[in-house]
């Protein structure tokens, strides 16, 4: 029997969000888990509890001054951590630290061979930079995870693949000059959508020039356009031969999201997840962690994330 897919859930993880009427509300965790329970995956998935990250964990990616700022403003519980998207709510430091810690828990479990695949729904906070919050993202769990895989587990070539409608700018610029961080991101063209970055001419700097892949999609692009873009990503990742895959599978690229303009169905997420599992089996000993990312239509995120988990299960 294949190893179960680890899926993380718990109130500590659900607490990352900003309440109504903010798009990143506190209900996103619950609607996903309700949908997943209806999928009938049974023993093929293993529910696992969140854990908090330490300050030392956060320092793998973020600056000490920025961590101190978040801690201080979280205690004060007022204002914004950025220019107006990410409120400094009371307790947001602990909630954001739990997102990071849970992604690290998934990485560690896979490196121990407790499983080959894991999914963390409230994670993939790809806009946070090394010294700043941005776009609903306080700490960048994938950025910390990439550094953690290197410093704790001795890996070098980490692949980060992002199909969220928004460009993963925190990851791109955080590793822009790093030739061993394999970055592939398909997103809505930044001329039409936050954060305005991710042009196809952005391929890395210095020694990393030519090692980053950005694919900008026109508003209204659907599954057919996604398939064409995905074939480029699949070839790119296959050629790079990574040792571990981090998959940010934001569901705001599905038709009907209230703040984006793409028109995928959840089949795009299912197909991408299946393809990445095949590449993980080929190059990484099966090792892949999926993170939920964005998605502000609750039905869309529940279905898309569930299809990712189903693809992880079906990959064996």
Image: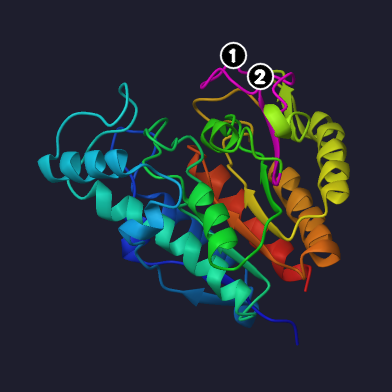
Q: Residue furthest left?
A: 76
Q: Residue at x 34, y 50 (%)?
A: 96
- Quarter residue 30 falls in: bottom left
Q: Is residue 316 above or below residue 58?
A: below
Q: Is residue 194 magenta?
A: yes
User: Picture coordinates of residue 72 (x, y %)?
Assistant: 16, 42
Crowding at mark 2 (Cα within 10 Å: few <14, some 14-19, many 20+) = many
Depth check, front residue: 133 or 119? 133
In the picture provided, is 279 more to the left or to the right than 100?
Answer: right
- Relative to 37, is 197 above or below? above
Q: Secondary structure beneath disc 1?
A: loop
Please give the name of the residue rendered at 72% of the width and 33% of the height, measured from the top-left corner: 207
Q: Is residue 292 left or right of residue 83?
A: right
Marker disc for residue 189: 2
Which quarter of the picture shows residue 139? top left
The kind of secondary structure the magenta stretch mainly shows is loop
For residue 229, above or below residue 311: above
Q: For the residues marked 1 and 2, what is the alpha-carbon distance in whole angstroms?
A: 6 Å
Residue identified by numbered label 1: 192
Give the magenta-colored segment's residue range. Answer: 180-203
Residue 185 is situated, as x and y percent measured from the top left of the image, at 69, 35
User: Is residue 197 shown to the viewer in this render?
Assistant: yes
- Disc 1: CA contacts within 10 A as few (<14), some (14-19) or many (>=20): few
Asked whether 105 falls inside the magenta stretch, the response is: no
Corner quadrant of residue 235: top right
Question: Residue 68: x percent and y percent?
Answer: 23, 43
Whether residues under marks 1 and 2 lie with C-beta atoms below 8 angstroms apart, the answer is yes
Q: Is any part of residue 37 visible from this angle?
A: no
Quadrant assignment for the C terminus: bottom right
């Amino acid at each position: 029997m294949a190893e179960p897919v680890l899926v993380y859930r718990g109130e500590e993880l659900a607490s990352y969000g900003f309440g109504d009427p903010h798009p990143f509300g506190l209900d996103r965790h619950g609607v996903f888990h309700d949908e997943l329970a209806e999928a009938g995956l049974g023993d093929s998935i293993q529910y696992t509890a969140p854990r908090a990250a330490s300050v030392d964990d956060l320092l793998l990616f973020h600056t000490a001054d920025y961590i101190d700022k978040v801690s201080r403003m979280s205690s004060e519980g007022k204002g914004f951590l950025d220019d107006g998207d990410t409120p400094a709510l009371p307790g947001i430091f602990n909630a954001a630290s739990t997102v990071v810690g849970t992604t690290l828990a998934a990485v560690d479990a896979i490196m121990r061979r407790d499983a080959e695949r894991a999914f963390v729904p409230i994670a993939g906070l790809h806009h946070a930079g090394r010294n700043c919050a941005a776009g609903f993202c306080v700490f960048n769990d994938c950025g910390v995870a990439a550094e953690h895989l290197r410093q704790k587990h001795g890996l070098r070539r980490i692949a980060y693949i992002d199909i969220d409608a928004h460009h993963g700018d925190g990851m791109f610029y955080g590793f822009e000059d790093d030739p061993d961080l394999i970055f592939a991101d398909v997103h809505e063209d930044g001329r039409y959508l936050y954060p305005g970055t991710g042009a196809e001419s952005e391929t890395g700097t210095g020694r990393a020039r030519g090692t980053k892949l950005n694919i900008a999609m026109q508003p209204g692009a659907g599954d057919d356009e996604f398939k064409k873009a995905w074939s480029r990503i699949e070839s790119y990742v296959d050629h790079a031969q990574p040792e571990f895959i981090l998959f940010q599978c934001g569901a705001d690229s599905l038709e009907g999201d209230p703040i984006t303009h793409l028109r995928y169905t959840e089949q795009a997420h299912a197909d991408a997840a299946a393809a990445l599992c095949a590449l993980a089996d080929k190059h990484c000993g099966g090792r892949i962690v999926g993170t939920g990312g964005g998605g502000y239509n609750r039905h869309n995120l529940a279905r898309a994330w569930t299809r990712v988990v189903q693809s992880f299960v079906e990959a064996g």
